[in-house]
Image (tube, grey):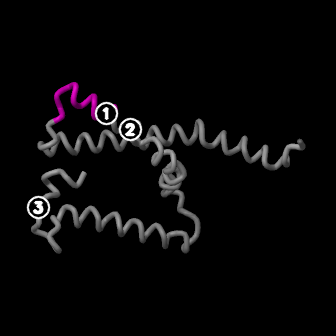
């Protein structure tokens, strides 16, 4: 991601490009904001989508390589692998992100949650007698 030429400039602070500082700074601000959000009570109803995305974040962590690789192969096969072109590069990033988030949400709802319910039920039943 950071190897893209748009990030390679050193005109920003501490020899980083301004784009890299903006993206990394935004991510840091969101992280710090997310750590302080629970102090204010439960999430409001208009923010429930973020709660669902947070619930499926572990599935996203596990499955994003399985999504990114095939999408990259498809882009190469249709001759859109020129990542020097900003429109192609950012459309690839957006497409892979959307597909990975949707797939991880499906994996969370269809596999992770039922498995958690099953394991919780077995745990509540007690240990097996040998």
Which of these two is toward me, 96 or 73?
A: 73
- State the residue at coordinates (42%, 43%): 101
Per the model, the C-alpha gap separating discs 1 and 3 is: 28 Å
> Which residue does the numbered mark 2 point to in the structure image?
99
Q: Residues within 10 Å of mark 3 (few under 14, many from 20)?
A: some
> Which residue does the numbered mark 3 point to in the structure image?
9
Going from the N terminus, do you reach mark 2 or mark 3 first?
3
Which element type, helix, strand or loop, lies under badge 1? Answer: helix
The answer to whether mark 2 and mark 3 are in CB contact below 8 A is no
Which of these two is toward me, 30 or 62?
A: 62
- Whether the magenta-drawn stretch holds residue 77 is answered as yes
| Rendered location of residue 128, percent (x, y) | 85, 43
Query: Is residue 55 found left or right of 75 in the rendered image?
Result: right
Residue occupying the far front of the picture: 130
The answer to whether mark 1 and mark 3 are in CB contact below 8 A is no
Q: Which range is magenta?
A: 70-81
Going from the N terminus, do you reach mark 1 or mark 3 first?
3
- State the residue at coordinates (41%, 66%): 31
> Which residue does the numbered mark 1 point to in the structure image?
71
Quarter occupied by residue 100: top left
Mark in front: 2 vs 1: 1
| Rendered location of residue 69, percent (x, y) | 33, 35
Q: Main secondary structure of the magenta part?
A: helix
Per the model, the C-alpha gap separating discs 2 and 1 is: 9 Å
| Rendered location of residue 34, percent (x, y) | 46, 67
The answer to whether mark 2 and mark 1 are in CB contact below 8 A is yes
Which element type, helix, strand or loop, lies under badge 3? Answer: loop
Q: Residues within 10 Å of mark 1 (few under 14, many from 20)?
A: some
Mark in front: 2 vs 3: 3
């Amino acid at each position: 991601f950071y190897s893209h030429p748009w990030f390679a400039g050193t005109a920003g602070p501490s020899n980083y490009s301004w784009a890299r500082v903006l993206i990394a700074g935004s991510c840091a601000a969101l992280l710090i904001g997310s750590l302080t959000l629970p102090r204010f009570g439960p999430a409001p109803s208009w923010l429930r989508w973020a709660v669902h995305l947070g619930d499926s974040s572990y599935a996203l962590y596990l499955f994003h390589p399985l999504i990114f690789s095939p999408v990259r192969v498809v882009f190469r096969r249709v001759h859109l692998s020129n990542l020097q072109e900003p429109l192609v590069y950012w459309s690839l990033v957006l497409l892979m992100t959307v597909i990975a988030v949707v797939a991880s949400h499906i994996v969370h709802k269809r596999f992770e949650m039922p498995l958690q319910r099953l394991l919780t039920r077995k745990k509540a039943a007690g240990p097996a007698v040998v």
